[in-house]
Image (tube, rainbow, N blue to C red):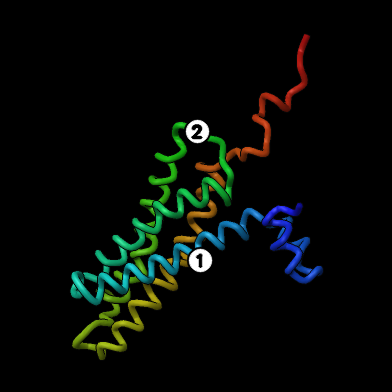
Amino acid sequence: MPSPTQRALSRVPERYRPFLVQHRKLVKFLLVGGTCFVLTTAIDLGLKFTVLQHKPVVALTIATVIATVVSYVLNRQWSFRANGRQREAILFFVVSAFAVVVNDLPLVFSRYVLDFREPDVSPLGQEIADFVSGMLVGTFLAMLFRFWAMNRWVFTRSRLQPPAEDLEPERV
C-alpha cells in the first residue's frame, strides 16, 4: 500500500517529481510556512479589528508567536523530522524570536518611518500598507532567515540520518 507521500506524489506531473523529491525538506518547510501564514493572517486581522485596533505591531507579534508554536511542532515532526535534542526547542525559540523581530521590522518601517497610517493615508491604504509590509515582506524575510537558521543550528540531524559517530569505521 503506498504511503500518503507516494499518493500525493502520484498526483504531481512526472516532470516535477524529481525536483520535489530532491527538495522535499524545502517543500515541506514551505507547506508548513503557508499553513502558519494563513494562521498568522487570521489571528493578526482578528486582533487588529477587535482588541488591538491601535496596536498593529503588537497584533502581528502575538499572531506570529502563536503561529511559531504551531510551526515548531509541524517542522519538528514533519519537515525536518529531527532527532530529539535537549537544546532543540530552546534553539528553535531563540531563532524564532529573532525571526519575529525580522517579521515586525518592515511593518514598523512602513507605519512609523514612511508614515503609512491614518490620517496621512486612508484607512484602506493603511491596511494595505500593513498587510504588504508586515504579512508579505516581513513574513518573506523571516521565512528566509528561519529556513537558513533552522538548518544551520536547530534541526541539524534528521531521524533518517545516522549520527556522525555511526558513520566512522570501527577501529580495532
Q: Name the residue under label 2.
A: 85
**Mark-to-mark CA distance, 1 and 2:** 26 Å
Say which residue appears at 25% left-offset and 88% top-offset: 123
Say which residue appears at 40% left-offset and 66% top-offset: 39
Q: Residue 34 carries which label?
A: 1
For numbered disc 2, what is the local secondary structure?
loop
Q: Determine which quarter of the picture holds residue 57.
A: bottom left
Question: Left or right of 60: which side holds 143?
Answer: right
Q: In this view, does 58 lie above or below 97?
A: below
- Kind of residue indicated by mark 1: Gly
Q: Determine which quarter of the picture holds residue 19.
A: bottom right
Say which residue appears at 21% left-offset and 74% top-offset: 50
Say which residue appears at 40% left-offset and 78% top-offset: 132
Decide which of 41, 3 is in the foreground and name it. Answer: 3
Question: Left or right of 92: which side holds 110?
Answer: left
List x then y, in percent, for residue 114.
29, 79
Q: Which residue lies furthest to the bottom in this view?
A: 122
List x then y, in percent, for residue 120.
22, 88
